Image (cartoon, grey):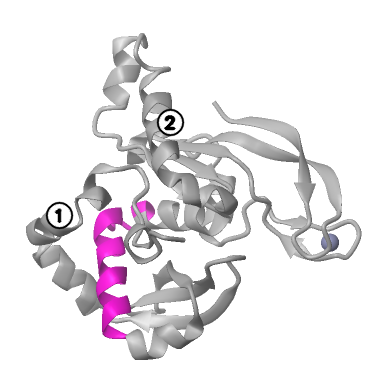
Amino acid sequence: MSQIKPQLVTCPECGFAEERTLFVSLNGERVPTQVLHLLDDTFEEQVCGQCGACFRPEHELLYSHFALRIWIVMMPRAMRPRFAALEAAVLSQFQQPFAEAPPLVSAGLAGVRPRLVFGQPFLSEAVRVIELGIEPALLEAAKLFFFRRNLGRLMPLGPHELTFRGFVPEGQDLQLAVRRLGDGAIIEELTMPRSVLDEVTAEREEIAARYPELFARPYVSAARYLHAAE
Ligand SMILES: [Zn+2]
C-alpha cells in the first residue's frame, strides 16, 4: 500500500518551488530500502534546482509497518500548533478504513497505536525508536527528565526540542540532536545517559499517571508539555 504522487516542493533556503515525486503512503514491510533512508535521516532528500540546498520536504505521509505494529501519520512541522485537532483526525482516519476490513486485516491491526509526528526528523525518530525496541512514551518522558535536569545548559539555546539519533557507538547512552523549534535545524548534539531511560522505565506506572497523554494520545511528544503555548 505504498503510494507516490508528484507534489509541489518548496526549498526552505531560497523558496524555489518545483514538482517532485514524494510518498503519500509508505509500507515499511514492502520497501525496506526506504526504511534504511528513514533510519539514516536521508528519506526523500531533495536537492534544490535553483540554489543546490539539500533538504527533506515537509508534507503529509502515512507510514505503516504492521509486523512492528507501526501506523504513523507525518504532517508538516508548521501544522503542530493544531496538534489536538489533528490527533482527533488521525484517530478517526485510523479507525475508518479498517472498520469493515476482513478479520485478517483487523487482526493485523491489534495492538497498533496510531501516532502523529510533525516533520521528517520526527518520522525518522519514531521508526528508529520502534526498530530499537524502545517504548516511544518512555523516551519522551526521559527527554522531559533530561531537559529539566539540564536547564542551565539547554535554556540558553532558545526554544528547541530533542530528537533521538541512536545509541552512542559501542555503548548504551543515547545520542540526541537539539533542534531549533522554528525551522528544525540542528543547533547542538548531546548525549543522554542510559540511566535516564532506565529510570523512567522503572517508574513507568508513575510516569503514565503524570503524563497520561504520552501513553494514550497519537502525538507522543515531550513538546506537548514543554511548548504548549507555542
Ligand atoms: Zn533553494
Residue 102 appears left or right of 47: left
Q: Quadrant of the N terminus?
A: top right
The kind of residue on which mark 2 rests is Ala
Residue 219 vs 113, above or below: the answer is below
Q: How many marks?
A: 2
Q: Secondary structure at mark 1?
A: helix
Residue 147's x, y, as percent? 32, 77
Residue 111 appears left or right of 204: right
Magenta stretch in the rendered image: 130-150
Residue 28's x, y, as percent? 49, 40
What residue appears at the point 41 percent right and 60 percent down from the top-left corner?
229
Q: Is mark 2 within 8 Å of ligand 1?
A: no
Q: CA distance from mark 1 to mark 2?
A: 24 Å
Residue 63 on the magenta segment: no
Mark identifier at residue 153: none
The kind of residue on which mark 1 rests is Ala
Q: Quick check: can you spot residue 82? A: yes
What residue appears at the point 59 percent right and 54 percent down from the top-left corner?
37
Residue 140 on the magenta segment: yes
What residue appears at the point 58 percent right and 66 percent down from the top-left corner?
182
Residue 156 vs 176, above or below: the answer is below
Residue 189 vs 120, above or below: the answer is below
Nearer to the camera, 22 or 108? 22
Helix, strand or loop: magenta stretch = helix
Mark 1 packing: few (<14 Cα in 10 Å), some, or many (20+)?
some
Q: Secondary structure at mark 2?
A: helix
Instruction: Residue 65: name its quadrant.
Output: top left
Name the residue tied to disc 1.
Answer: 208
Residue 55's x, y, as percent? 71, 60
Mark identifier at residue 89: 2
Kindly give the residue lying farthest to the bottom in the view shown. 152
Mark toward the viewer: 1 or 2: 2
